[in-house]
């Protein structure tokens, strides 16, 4: 098999891969939806396809962040964006910590654990986006 050298064919191949990915993702969502309807939320999350779906969604999100930073038109200050994102993330965590005790089944461990998980899971993409923007600014200078 020969390596593709024509740019038009490379782009066509990438579009075909994207279409196959979309069809595969829709199939996974359909299977998980069927499990949700028949077995409930626990049956859906016990399915191994759930982990495949979550992992592919996370990887796709991180890869699309790289593309979106490369196509930003104006030069953005990475530190300003980092501060804004951190303020939003901390406000979400504090709000969830305030609202969680209103639910009867939550105890103090859950009230501290769930906002902590929100913070860690939100901090990873924020720092990744900051690093991408900082690297882009250094490359353009």
Image (spheres, helix red, strand yellow):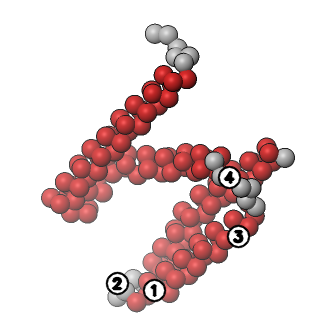
Tell which circle, 3 or 1, labels the residue nearer the N-terminal end. Answer: 3
The percent position of residue 89, horizontal first and vertical second, equals: 59, 72
**CB-based contact (under 8 Å), mark 3 and mark 2:** no
Q: Residue furthest right?
A: 141
Which residue: 69% across, 65% down? 81
- The residue wearing badge 3 is 83
Tell which circle, 2 or 1, labels the residue nearer the N-terminal end. Answer: 1
Mark number for residue 73? 4
Tell me the SS state at disc 3: helix
The percent position of residue 102, horizontal first and vertical second, equals: 40, 89
The percent position of residue 100, horizontal first and vertical second, equals: 44, 83
Position of 21 compared to 80: left or right? left
Position of 95 compared to 103: left or right? right
Mark number for residue 99? 1
Position of 50 compared to 34: left or right? right
Q: Is residue 16 above or below residue 80?
A: above
The percent position of residue 134, horizontal first and vertical second, equals: 75, 53
Could you give the CA–CA distance between mark 2 and mark 1, rounded to whole angstroms?
Answer: 12 Å
**CB-based contact (under 8 Å), mark 4 and mark 1:** no
Tell me the SS state at disc 4: loop
Mark number for residue 105? 2
> Which marked residue is nearer to the observer: mark 3 or mark 4?
4
What is the crowding at mark 4: few (fewer than 14 residues within 10 Å), some, or many (at least 20)?
Answer: few
Could you give the CA–CA distance between mark 3 and mark 1, rounded to whole angstroms?
Answer: 24 Å
């Amino acid at each position: 098999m020969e390596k593709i050298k024509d740019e038009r064919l490379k782009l066509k191949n990438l579009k075909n891969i994207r279409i196959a990915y979309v069809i595969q993702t829709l199939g996974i969502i359909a299977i998980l939806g069927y499990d949700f309807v028949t077995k409930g939320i626990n049956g859906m999350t016990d399915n191994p396809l759930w982990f495949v779906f979550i992992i592919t969604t996370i990887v796709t999100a991180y890869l699309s962040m790289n593309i979106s930073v490369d196509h930003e038109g104006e030069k953005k200050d990475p530190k300003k964006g980092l501060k804004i994102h951190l303020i939003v993330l901390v406000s979400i965590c504090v709000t969830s910590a305030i609202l969680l005790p209103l639910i009867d089944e939550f105890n103090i461990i859950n009230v501290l654990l769930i906002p902590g998980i929100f913070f860690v899971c939100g901090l990873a993409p924020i720092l990744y986006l900051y690093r991408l923007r900082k690297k882009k600014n250094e490359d353009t200078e």
